[in-house]
Image: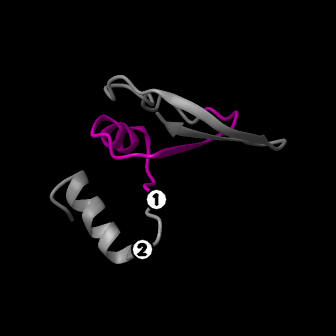
Amino acid sequence: MTGGIIDALDQARAAASDRTVSIAGGAATVNQYLAAGLIDELRLHVAPVFLGRGERLLAGAGRVDLRQVSARQTSVVTHLTYALK
């Protein structure tokens, strides 16, 4: 348990030492980190499968300027990578 997203990120950075920290989670998690300006790169893995209603990505995140870095597809998933401007 943490004291919020910044505390969780601080703990992850401490555990990772000088390595890269990745944030995994659903739309609500990503939106919180985007709104706080704590994401440098956004990687999305899109599969044409409906799992229910879900949550909206980018909802409540404020203005987010993305620059597409790469896109790669297979027969079952498309991998998209964006840098935040």
Of tags 2 and 1, the one toward the viewer is 2
Q: CA distance from mark 2 to mark 1?
A: 13 Å
Q: Which residue is mark 1?
A: 22
Disc 2 element? loop
The residue that disc 2 covers is: 18
Tell whether 32 sits left or right of 79.
left
Q: Amino acid at mark 2?
A: Asp
Tell me if 66 is positioned left or right of 33 in this view: right
Crowd band around label 2 with a 10 angstrom C-alpha radius: few (<14), some (14–19), many (20+) = few
Q: Measured from the top left, where is residue 37 in percent x and y?
A: 32, 40
From which residue to which does the magenta span run?
A: 22-50
Seen in the picture, residue 11 relative to 85 is either above or below; the reply is below
Residue 27's x, y, as percent? Answer: 42, 38
Query: Is residue 72 within the magenta segment?
Result: no
- Which residue is at 30% across, 35% downward? 35
Task: Give the residue displayed 34% in from the left and 76% down from the top.
Answer: 15
46 magenta-colored: yes
- Type of amino acid at the residue the image marks with label 1: Ser
